[in-house]
Image (spheres, rainbow, N blue to C red):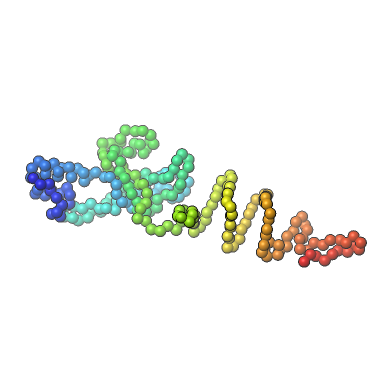
């Protein structure tokens, strides 16, 4: 007998008259029914995340699958939330890029072939926590897709690398070294340098009214208003102009 098809409009795995025609059709129906219970990978939306961008170990997310199931009449059935799915972080040893998922993110969840609950709890080689297989409960969130344009990002393209933030960019390290042919700093308001000492190796060229157009006082002596005593008359000279 021919295999039951979807040309009659019934969802795969639903019982139809042809499903009972012969051993082949009966076996096909049985296999399709079992496969329909297997979770592999799907699109999900993040409901909540245990972390929010701070310095912390990798956390977990609660997600809702976006592809709904349907009943025999083709009516969509709302999905339930899958809780406590570990999410992927780019990390090696103690080195990491911290970008925690946020509520509303759309991403991909994959599902383990066995119960991973004990391995999640112990973070070590463990037997499966139960006999369940390919379950929604054993999902892992591996990253975002179908999301909108970011407002804070690191961009790589043919013109170079761009780091953009609408708030602030901070470098925090015992030593920071910049090696380049040219370095430019464009600050629309001000630049402040706070350090006990500053060393400039090389020629220093300063221009603009903020450089030497305003007075500079060193050890109590004004650059613009200091005078010299003439030895012969002991009278002060005019200030420099």
Q: Do we see residue 46 in this rendering? A: no
Query: In the rendering, at what x and y percent does residue 13 appear?
Result: 17, 47
Q: Nearer the viewer, residue 196 or 210?
A: 210
Please say whether residue 161 is visible from this viewpoint: yes
Q: Nearer the viewer, residue 154 or 130?
A: 154
Q: Position of residue 40 (x, y in %)?
A: 28, 45
**Residue at (32, 51) in percent of width and height:** 44
Residue at point 88% right, 61% down?
230
> Which residue is located at x 21 percent, y 44 percent?
35
Residue 42 vertical placement versus 119 (above, below): below
Quarter of image, res 216: bottom right
Residue 182: image x %, image y %? 59, 54
| 173 left or right, relative to 122 | right
Q: Is residue 9 left or right of residue 97?
A: left
Compared to residue 214, the image places residue 129 above or below, namely above
In percent of the image, x 24 and y 43: which residue is there? 38
* Residue 75 falls left or right of residue 161: left
In the rendering, at what x and y percent does residue 112 appear? 30, 41
């Amino acid at each position: 007998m021919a295999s039951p098809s979807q040309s009659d409009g019934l969802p795969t795995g639903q019982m139809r008259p042809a499903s009972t025609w012969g051993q082949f059709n009966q076996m096909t129906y049985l296999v399709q029914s079992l496969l329909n219970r297997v979770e592999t990978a799907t699109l999900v939306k993040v409901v909540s995340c245990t972390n929010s961008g701070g310095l912390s170990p990798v956390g977990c997310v609660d997600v809702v699958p976006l592809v709904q199931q349907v009943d025999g009449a083709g009516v969509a059935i709302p999905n339930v939330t899958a809780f406590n799915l570990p999410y992927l972080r780019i990390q090696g040893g103690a080195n990491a890029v911290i970008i925690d998922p946020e509520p509303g993110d759309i991403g991909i969840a994959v599902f383990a072939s066995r119960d991973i609950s004990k391995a999640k709890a112990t973070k070590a080689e463990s037997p499966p926590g139960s006999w369940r297989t390919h379950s929604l409960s054993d999902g892992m969130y591996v990253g975002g897709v179908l999301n909108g344009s970011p407002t804070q990002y690191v961009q790589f393209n043919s013109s170079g690398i761009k780091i953009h933030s609408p708030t602030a960019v901070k470098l925090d390290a015992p030593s920071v070294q910049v090696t380049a042919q040219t370095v430019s700093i464009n600050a629309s308001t001000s630049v402040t340098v706070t350090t006990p000492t500053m060393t400039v190796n090389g020629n220093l060229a300063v221009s603009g009214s903020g450089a030497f157009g305003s007075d500079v006082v060193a050890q109590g002596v004004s650059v613009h208003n200091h005078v010299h005593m003439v030895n012969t008359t002991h009278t002060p000279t005019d200030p420099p102009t």
